[in-house]
Image (cartoon, rainbow, N blue to C red):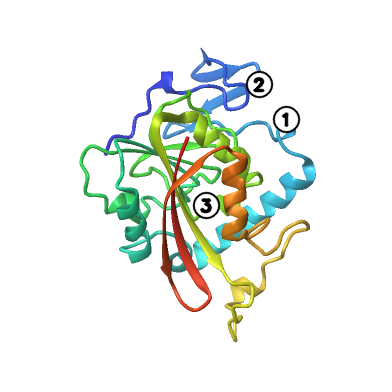
């Protein structure tokens, strides 16, 4: 698969200014971004973007997420031929240049591994370095601060990742910025009824996780409802053009959305 990202596709994730080369690094007024040989690291200086309180909560949620990925990857990642990921891929009907925001730590997620279109160039961005080298182009960074030029991508996707961001509206605004005028944003939201019965017994690794201050559960600031998600879409001034709902069971739904500018 094609994995080299042209340098001129990058901008500073914070200021959006053009980057300059300096000793194999890319530099802007907001910081220095490093070439880690297999990928670029565009993670911005946290002091400039989020409060200490939110950042510390997010970091703990990320740590908890890593535990879940390592302890039970089949339930928490797109690994293997998972039908729900394949359903989402079919819904997306991938376009030539795709940005996957919050792609996860796996070497190649289901929707990329089993893609059969030959003209698709996937770029994934995630704060977790994950397994390297990846089987697709990868950048380390945050979805709220994308290091890409305006109107670059044909498609931007969120594969169950939107409810893991500090600021869902900000990442949607960033997705909108890097999307071509005729492009689309595809989002998979997993909705779980608050009255869903809890498992009789949770695995030991889960029982040891701490819910950080300001978070709703060990993995999310907030698990938002479909109504709340649609409010975020409105705030980002995006339009819902298509919606498909898959019933998982009496309490859970997989909701697929397509958005446009």
Residue 144 versus residue 223 in the image, above or below: above
Q: Are marks 1 and 2 in contact (CB under 8 Å)?
A: yes
Q: How many marks?
A: 3
Q: Do the residues labelled 3 and 2 touch (CB within 8 Å)?
A: no
Q: In this view, does 184 lie to the left or right of 68?
A: left
Q: Which residue is drawn at 58% across and 82% down?
A: 199
Which is more foreground, mark 3 or mark 2?
3
Q: Which residue is drawn at 66% across and 21% down?
A: 30
Residue 56 versus residue 248 in the image, above or below: above
Could you say which disc has been placed on residue 30 in the image? Answer: 2
Label 3 element class:
loop
Counting from the top left corner in percent of width and height, residue 131 is at 43, 49
Q: In this view, does 109 lie to the left or right of 227?
A: left
Residue 13 versus residue 169 in the image, above or below: above
**First reached walking from the N terminus: tag 3 or tag 2:** 2
State whether residue 142 appears in this view.
no
Q: Are marks 1 and 3 in contact (CB under 8 Å)?
A: no
Q: Mark 3 points at which residue?
A: 161
The front one of 192 and 118 is 192
Counting from the top left corner in percent of width and height, residue 261 is at 47, 34
Quarter the N terminus occupies:
top left
Label 2 element class:
loop
**First reached walking from the N terminus: tag 1 or tag 2:** 2
Residue 188 versus residue 138 in the image, above or below: below
Q: Is residue 106 left or right of residue 56?
A: left
Q: Name the residue under label 1.
A: 48
State whether residue 83 appears in this view.
yes
What is the distance, in whole Å, between disc 1 and disc 2 at their CAs? 9 Å
């Amino acid at each position: 698969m094609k994995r080299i990202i042209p340098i001129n596709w990058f901008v500073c994730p914070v200021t959006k200014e053009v980057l300059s080369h300096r000793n194999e690094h890319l530099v802007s007024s907001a910081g220095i971004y490093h070439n880690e040989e297999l990928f670029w690291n565009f993670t911005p200086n946290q002091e400039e973007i989020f409060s200490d309180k939110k950042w510390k909560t997010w970091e703990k949620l990320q740590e908890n997420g890593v535990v879940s990925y390592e302890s039970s990857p089949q339930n928490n990642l797109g690994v293997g031929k998972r039908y729900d990921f394949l359903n989402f891929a079919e819904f997306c009907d991938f376009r030539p240049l795709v940005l996957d925001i919050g792609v996860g730590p796996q070497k190649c997620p289901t929707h990329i591994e089993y893609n059969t279109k030959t003209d698709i160039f996937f770029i994934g961005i995630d704060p977790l370095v994950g397994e390297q080298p990846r089987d697709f182009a990868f950048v380390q960074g945050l979805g709220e601060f994308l290091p890409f030029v305006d109107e670059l991508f044909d498609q931007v996707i969120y594969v169950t990742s939107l409810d893991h961001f500090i600021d869902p509206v900000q990442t949607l605004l960033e997705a909108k910025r890097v999307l071509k005028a005729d492009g689309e944003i595809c989002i998979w939201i997993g909705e779980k009824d608050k009255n869903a019965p809890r498992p009789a017994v949770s695995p030991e690794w889960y029982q040891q996780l701490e819910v950080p201050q300001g978070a709703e559960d060990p993995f999310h600031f907030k698990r938002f409802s479909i109504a709340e998600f649609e409010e975020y879409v409105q705030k980002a001034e995006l339009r819902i053009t298509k919606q498909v709902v898959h019933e998982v069971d009496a309490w859970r739904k997989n909701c697929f959305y397509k958005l446009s500018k």
